[in-house]
Amino acid sequence: MNFMILKFNKITVDSKHNYLLLFLLVFTSAVYTKTLPELEKELESVGDKQALTILSNYKSDIENWKKEDQGRYYTLMGLKLENTDLDLSEQNYNKAIIMLEELDFVSENLINALIERSYVYYLRTNDPKYYCPDRKKALDLARQTNDFQETLARALVQYSFCFDGKQEKFPEALKLLEEAILIAEQQNLNQPLIYNATAILYRSNNIYKKSYEYFIKAYQSWEKENDIQDMFNMQHSLLNISLKMGDIELAKEHEKILFKLTADNPEFSDFLFFSYFNASMISLQENDFEKTIENT
C-alpha cells in the first residue's frame, strides 16, 4: 500500500501513523480565533494609540465573529479615533450602525453606536438638528426592551441635552432626567453623569439652588469612583453656582477643596491654574481687585 505524504508548516507527516497529530495541528491553527471579550479585556486601561494597535491586530479575526460583535468592534474603533480623526471615527460608526441595523433584534450595541456617532456630529457642528436625530433614535430603541436599563438611562441623559438652552423645553428635558434618575435608583447604579446633566439643566434655567444640589450629588458619585478629574470639575461648578447664588462663604469652602485636590494630586498639572482662576473669581466678586490680579 502506498502511503500519502502530507506537508504542513514544513513538517512531513506519514498519514498512516500521524493522522491525530495532523488533525491537531490543522484544528488549532485554523479554528482558534480571538474573541470580542478578549479584545475588550486588552483595551482596558490603555491609551488611544495603543488601543488602535490592538484593534488593528484583531482585524483578521472579526470575519469569524457574529454580526453583533463585528458591529461592536467598529464602534470601539470609532471611539478610539474620536480624538484624532473625526472622519474615520464617523466611518467606523457608520459601519457599525449599518451592520447592527440588519439584526432581527434590538441590540444594545446599536443604541450605544448611535449615541457615540451623535457625539461626533456634536463635535463637528454643535447643532442639535445634526446630532439629536441619532439620540432620539437611540432612546426609541432603548424603550423597546426592558433588558438595557442602564443604557436606557444613558439614552435619556443624552437626549435631554437636545433641549439645553430652550427654556420652553425645560419640563420635557427635566422629565427625561427624572426618569433616568429613577432607573439609577431602582437598579442601584452609580450615575454621576445623570446628576451632572440635571445640574446643568437647572443652571441653564437659572434655578441655582437645585443646580447646586445636583452638582453635589454628581461630586459624591465621582468620589465613589475616585475619579479625581471629575471631582475637581464638580468643585469648579459648585464654586461658580455658589457665586451665582451670592454665597461667597460657600464658594470659599469649595475653593479650599479645589486647592486640596490640587495639593493631593500633583500629577494633574492644570489643577493649580484653575484653582487660582477660581480664587480670582471669588476675589473679583468681593471687589478685591488687587487680590484678583494676584490670583490671575
Image (cartoon, rainbow, N blue to C red):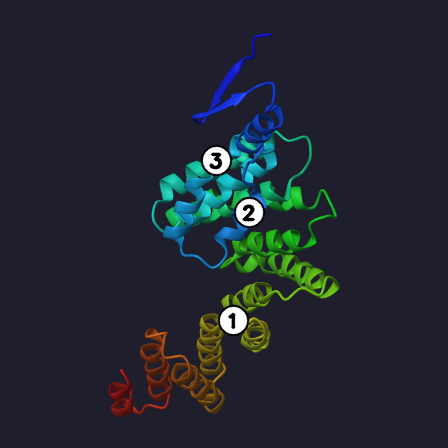
| Picture coordinates of residue 266, whole percent (x, y) | 36, 79
Q: How many marks?
A: 3
The one nearer the camera, 232 or 175, is 232
Discs 1, 2 touching: Cβ within 8 Å: no
Q: Is residue 135 visible from the viewing direction of this image?
A: no
Question: What secondary structure is found at the residue carrying circle 2?
Answer: helix
As drawn, is 235 to the left or to the right of 214?
left
Report the residue marked by disc 3.
94
Which quadrant: the C terminus? bottom left
Report the residue marked by disc 1.
206
Report the residue marked by disc 2.
38
Could you classify mark 2 by the number of other residues whose Cα lies within 10 Å: few (under 14), some (14-19), or many (20 or more)? Answer: few
The one nearer the camera, 125 or 265, is 265
Depth-wise, is mark 3 or mark 2 nearer the camera? 2
Could you classify mark 3 by the number of other residues whose Cα lies within 10 Å: few (under 14), some (14-19), or many (20 or more)? Answer: some
Q: Amino acid at mark 3?
A: Asn
Say which quarter of the image contains residue 68: top right
